[in-house]
Image: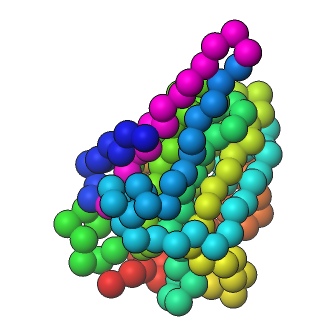
Amino acid sequence: MEYIKTKIEDVFILRPRVFGDERGYFMETFRQEDFCAHVCSTQFVQDNESKSSRGVLRGLHYQKGAFSQAKLVRVIRGRVLDVAVDLRRSSPTFMQHVAVELSDENRLQLFIPRGFAHGFLVLSQEAVFCYKVDNVYAPQAECSIRYDDPSIGVEWPMAREELLLSPKDLEGVDVAHAELFD
């Protein structure tokens, strides 16, 4: 596994080694000991999977307080633009974001530490998205920031009229009114 630093400290792109031949391929997607040595000492407790159609934008989500989550995300089928936004007030990269295309072809993974909002936009006809989290889902702690908040400045590669958002995501707040991390 290759661990690639991004412009935001603690956010990593993981590139697995893929072994393939005419029969198919094999790759290791996670090994606790190596992850701890190269990224951090996170213990994942839950795996999640979603399937979405082209234009679905999920995010920007996070859980606050004791329910904050770190995530390791990847795409099994399709292609997405994945975004992590630093919401840690004490961070030198506060309000900056990392955007990475994840796909079944490039097999990249993105590690998003606690203190970040996260979202993705499906670029292919459909996508199957998987993520490990280090804390259980807690609906009472869930927060949503507007995907198009101009203070964040994510450049989503689709026109607004092409996007499919849930009612919850349409009600996301501006960062100025969000509960952030210290």
Left or right: where 126 falls relative to 133: right
Q: Residue at x 57, y 69 (%)?
A: 44
- Which quadrant of the figure has residue 92? bottom left
Magenta stretch: give its range. 10-23
Q: Residue at x 50, y 88 (%)?
A: 65
- Which quadrant of the figure has residue 20? top right
Left or right: where 85 falls relative to 68: left
Residue 129 falls within the magenta-colored stretch: no
Q: Residue at x 45, y 37 (%)?
A: 15
Look at the image and tell me in which quarter the C terminus lies: bottom left
Who is closer to the viewer here, 73 or 23? 23
Coloring scheme of the render?
A: rainbow
Percent position of residue 82, x then y: 53, 45
Q: Residue at x 41, y 55 (%)?
A: 34
Left or right: where 173 falls relative to 38: right
- Which quadrant of the figure has residue 104? top right
Q: Is residue 83 visible?
A: no
Percent position of residue 141, x then y: 62, 85
